[in-house]
Amino acid sequence: MGQYARIQAIEYELPVNTLSNEDLARAHPEWGVEKIFSKVGINTRHVIDADECASDLAFRACEKLFAGAAIERGQIDFLILCTQSPDYFLPATACVLQDRLGLSTTCGAFDFNQGCSGFIYGLGIAKGLIETGQARNVLLVTAETYSKYIHPGDKSVRTLFGDAAAATLISVTEAESPFLDRFQYGTDGSGAPNLIVAAGGRRRPLEGRVKPAEYTDSSGNVRTDVNLYMNGSAIFEFAMSRVPQLFASLFDERLTMEAIDFFAFHQANKFMLDALRRRLHIPADKFITEFAHCGNTVSSTIPIALKEHHAKGHLREGNRVVAVGFGVGYSWGGCVIRW
């Protein structure tokens, strides 16, 4: 018997405000409700209030977890927060969240800025902390408010992204084999310009708080350089190239694709997920899609999908799941989860 890291509980939080396909169709009459859903597979996105931040969603997700999980907040040894929309440049939002949650001052806490692959990276960090004896209980939080970066005139990204936070408890457990295993990672920073908020940081600060001028692209999408920009075709090409390579690296003669019960990919959009599933020959009944009600929530898509699939009675104890995250960076990662 050894001591291994295991996912013990997942909870998530969505803002009350919603942006439906009907709302988008009214704002962009050239895009009907049916067309939007057929392309992205999303009915509704949740959008945070103007005066709220990622930490507010994160706090509520964590409070749900403490209310329902068999753990006291004083037992948390480490808080890891994945966000690309932090409350401040500094301090780390994880430190603010530690205090607000009332976690012990002996608890380690830090942010990491990873995006769509963030849940996989966070699981890998939690596994390392636990299986090297540095922690027994790690709270991995993913929280994103991309809506604050999106120009209302940019339908290319407004149709995709929703705000959310997820709280995942990873704890030490005794077992004969790992529950989190076969981690693989990858990075290609040459793709950074294809999914980016170009201005507002220290590389391109806002001079005198003056926002850059608006511009309209060839597809009629309006944005400025402080808004989210996505080169959709480049992101699609990246995913279709890198994800199959990553996917293949997770299997060998000791673990075959047929031994996997479910596949939980970053819930990017219907078009991309359908293309990847076909390319990888994954049976439809094993391929988890749980994002129509909330959209692409960046680093929270995989934990939300796992939580929803479990709540519906599909994901059961002992099932093996291949989880794959990919996107902004470019960054990608995958692992095998035993539920």
Image: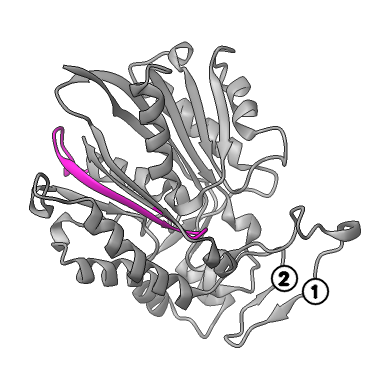
Indicate the amino acid at tag 2.
Thr
What residue appears at the point 24 percent right and 39 percent down from the top-left corner?
Answer: 337
User: Circle 1 is placed at which residue position?
Assistant: 213
Residue 136: give x, y in percent of width and height.
38, 17
Colour mode of the rendering: one colour
Q: Say what secondary structure mark 1 lies in.
A: loop
What residue appears at the point 40 percent right and 62 percent down from the top-left corner?
Answer: 268
Residue 238 visible in the shown view: yes
Please say if the residues under marks 1 and 2 sit with CB atoms less than 8 Å apart.
Answer: yes
**Numbered range of the magenta stretch:** 312-332
Residue 288: give x, y in percent of width and height.
24, 54
Indicate the amino acid at tag 1.
Ala
What residue appears at the point 48 percent right and 81 percent down from the top-left corner?
Answer: 31
Q: Residues within 10 Å of mark 1 (few under 14, many from 20)?
A: few
What residue appears at the point 34 percent right and 75 percent down from the top-left corner?
Answer: 38
Residue 224: assigned label = 2
Q: Is residue 47 above or below residue 150?
A: above
